[in-house]
Image (spheres, rainbow, N blue to C red):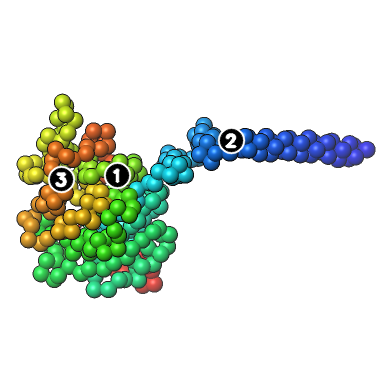
Amino acid sequence: MDLNKSIFENMKFRKYFLYIVIFTIIIVIWKLKATDNTGDNLQDLKDILHSHKHFLHITKQQLLLFEQLQKHINYEPIPVIYAITPTYYRLVQRAELTRISQTLRLIPNIHWIVIEDSEEKTNLVSKLLEESELTVTHLNAKTPPFEKLKDKEPSWKKHRGVEQRNAALSWLRENLTVGNQKGIVYFMDDDNSYHLNLFSEIRKVKRVGTWPVGLVGGLNVEAPILDPKTGKVKSYRSGWKPNRPFAIDMAGFAINLDLILTKKEATFSYKMERGWQESEFLSFFTTKEELEPLADNCTKVYVWHTRTEKPVVRGLVKGFEV
Ligand code: UDP
Ligand code: MN
């Protein structure tokens, strides 16, 4: 008797539950039908996601992606960020590239150009790029032996990444045409650390944008100093030669793609004085006054010039891809 009662109650409960589900579905369909503009629907959905973001574990970045999707549907294309990464073989290479590729996976509309400093493309990098599921272009360009940093030499002794960044610039100039797409070019070394907010700042660049870089040049941060009256860059807080035309690290600027495509003569060179690559390269495109200060008027640090310590390895265990 008791058993029958509980079955009966259970069925009754199920019936109510089913009514509630059907009712909810009808309401949702009705809501969606009532607004047949996709943009509005997305706005509703975004508001719902926003108000439930803690419950749903939605990150700010995913919300941003949603915002951009919405803009896209309203026919405002989001500029593609062409991130240029030179890389070379050492024990920490896979760790570095994993870190950077997994940062990039959180960013919409990224085209990652990876240039290996090697005679041929390696399996290690090819596999990593394939597994990243990112839009990638994989190139290789070997640094000439004479220009290559020796094992014990301090890093400032030689230019690094010259050959590789030039290969990426050539690829862009050979494969893309001016005015065909909105894009921004950023030099993204494989050992730096990147905050997700950096990419939203990069996307704001019209011609040439700049922002502070943490842990560089013997300072906790290098940052452009703005003129309070004009809001433009007046000078630089830099640990080394702040009077350079652009005392900015490679990680502290990004350039409009069409500018890169138009100024074909702009490349990096071994002939440049050490520490002047950024200044010489930027001089092709802009003046100090024309720089666009980003990251809250250059008050926020969204990228760090971190350098990975060379690990001391006393033995190599076979059979592992590290
Ligand atoms: N790099 C390279 N070949 C080299 C040394 C460096 O391709 O022989 C790459 C490196 O992977 C990085 C960029 O060039 O993406 C800048 O090098 P590094 O980080 O050593 O320079 P630093 O931090 O001292 O400016
Ligand atoms: Mn570095």
Are the residues at dot 3 and dot 1 in contact (C-beta closer than 8 Å)?
Answer: no
Residue in front for this viewpoint, 101 or 219: 101
Q: Quadrant of the N terminus?
A: top right
Label 2: state its secondary structure: loop
Q: Is residue 96 left or right of residue 220?
A: right
Percent across and percent down for residue 248 are 16, 45
Query: Disc 1 designates what residue?
Result: 202
**Residue under the image location 29 percent in, 58 percent down:** 177
Query: Disc 2 designates what residue?
Result: 35
Residue in front for this viewpoint, 317 or 243: 243
- The tag earlier along the polypeptide, 3 or 1, is 1
- The tag earlier along the polypeptide, 2 or 1, is 2
Label 3: state its secondary structure: loop
Q: CA distance from mark 2 to mark 3?
A: 46 Å
The circle drawn on residue 213 is none
Label 1: state its secondary structure: helix
Percent across and percent down for residue 183 are 31, 51
